Amino acid sequence: MALTVKTLTDGQLGTTAQAILYTVPAGKATIVKNHRFVNRDTVTRTINLYYLRSGGLNTTARFLLPSAMSLAAGALIVEENELTMAAGDVIQGDASVASKIDFVISGIERDA
């Protein structure tokens, strides 16, 4: 069983509601170790981060951070609570402005 410590995804949050940031690949399981968000703007912005479980009866995304969390100009948020995910599970996110909030999500992928 291969374990890979890696950057799962990185980029910039957009304004599209619950845009997909990362999906666990088929045949894999993931432990998200941390999420990092940096506001590169000169004013406070808000961000949302969600978890959506694959399959089953529950198709509602769950917040991973407080709703509309404020991120001051130039500030960094690091969330280090681990999140276990199965194949097809998704992390989604959005912000109050496009292309100003950088993010990096890091963790471990393993064969399921």
Image: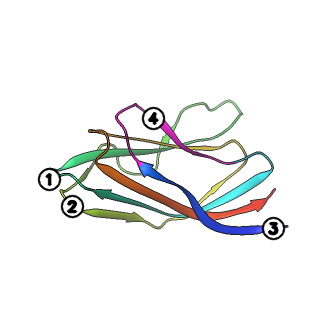
Spatial distance from mark 3 to mark 1, Cα to Cα? 43 Å
Q: Which mark is residue 74?
A: 2
Q: How far apart in space, not on screen, are marks 4 and 1 (Cα)? A: 24 Å
In the picture of the structure, the residue carrying the numbered disc 1 is: 42
Q: Secondary structure at mark 2?
A: loop
Which of the marked residues, 4 or 2, is nearer the chain's N terminus?
4
Asked if residue 80 lies in the magenta stretch, the reply is no
The mark nearer the N terminus, 4 or 1, is: 4
Left or right: residue 24 versus residue 46 is right
Q: Position of residue 107 (x, y in %)?
A: 59, 64
Quadrant position of residue 67: top left
At label 1, which amino acid type do we have? Thr
Q: Is residue 16 magenta?
A: yes
**Which residue ends up furthest to the right in the rendered image?**
1
Which residue occupies the foreground of this view, 34 or 100?
Answer: 100
Mark 1 touching mark 2, by CB under 8 A? yes
First to last magenta residue range: 12-24
The quadrant holding residue 111 is bottom right
Kindly report which numbered mark, 4 or 1, lies closer to the viewer in this rendering. Answer: 1
Residue receiving disc 3: 2
Residue 18: mark: 4
